[in-house]
Amino acid sequence: MKAGIPPAATAAEAIALSDLVKCYGSLRAVDGISFTVPEGEFFGFLGPNGAGKTTTIHCLVGLATPTAGSIRVFGNDVVRDYRAARQLVGLCPQEFNFDRYLTNRETLLYSAGYFGIPRNECQTRADELLKRFDLWSKRDETSVKLSGGMKRRLTIARALIHRPRILILDEPTAGVDVELRLELWRFLKELNEEGLTIVLTTHYLEEAETLCKRIAIIDGGRIVALEDKDALVARLAGHRLRVVYARPLDRPIAIPGIEVEGEGQQVTVQVKDPGQIATILAQLATFGQILDVAVDRKNLQDIFLELTSRSRSVAPETLAGKRLS
Ligand code: ATP
């Protein structure tokens, strides 16, 4: 090994980000993030608007140059070994960026050309992908005539034309209706089951919960959570117990070690351990006659809001200044 060159990533490490920083002038859009994605994983990359997701992805595929830190794709540094790294990644960008004068088949062939794939091979692959993504009947039309869902499928087909080992999707279901979203999820699940590593950025928490194995949450350019999805939900979420009393309570509820929110007839208790629910309920029943009980599991949405709320909280005077009234 040459002096000064870090050891290559193991074969199972598809992506390795190490202290990645990307600045735009004085803005640290990505502020020192590190994580790895093993081969074959469905990885969710979540965060509010402006959190740094797209910037990270742009650094990963060479559309932006990191200010500091490094990214390796199957051991290839995305700056030093750009061509090798880029060959291994397929990108579905957020915006549709098709050439409106190319047919959909030509769109795939044109993209294949960037990766030096021989002409005959390109045609075979393009036709396979057009059939697989239900676009065969549209092969000789331009993208202008495609529906939103078809355009999304064409974006994925184009990203796969050079047979990458990693597929990166930047908000693939933005603006897609429920039916088409389910259809895209099916395609993505299939691709992942075939061994493709997938990195997905999304605003749809349900999407990340349904598809991803691990989830990183980025906020203000920093990773605020990175965990197995189920563990994340279990660790941070717990359950919410809501109790409605038959009459307003005549004394405040005080149970040692339990935080009770609400007053009047309705109270809410956050419960970490579902095994405690029955005990807490029995204690709550000593304060008045219970009319109704609801228990729900907090989901990723709750966790996301909890973890990202700090940077979104705005000083009251700033809020007042923004009021429309
Ligand atoms: P969204 O969910 O809205 O797409 P995001 O998490 O992808 O957001 P980025 O697009 O990575 O966020 O933006 C991170 C920050 O960097 C934002 O403050 C954004 O305005 C800024 N930014 C992004 N690209 C540039 C650029 N080319 N020049 C200057 N600032 C930029």
Image (cartoon, grey):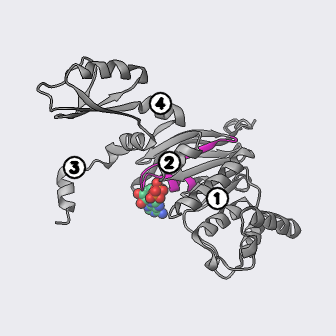
Amino acid on which the number 1 mark rests in the picture = Leu
Task: Describe the element under mark 1 as helix, strand or loop.
Answer: strand
Amino acid on which the number 2 mark rests in the picture = Glu
How many angstroms separate mark 4 from mark 1 (CA)? 32 Å
Left or right: where 297 falls relative to 75: left
Q: Which residue is mark 3?
A: 315
Q: Is residue 107 above or below residue 172?
A: below
Q: Which mark is residue 234?
A: 4
Locate residue 63, reporting x and y percent.
59, 61
Quadrant of the rendered image containing residue 128? bottom right
Left or right: where 95 falls relative to 301: right
Locate residue 127, reporting x and y percent.
81, 67
Left or right: where 178 falls relative to 295: right
Q: Which residue is mark 1?
A: 91
Q: Which residue is mark 2?
A: 206
Q: Do residues under tags 4 and 1 come within 8 Å of each other at their CB atoms?
A: no
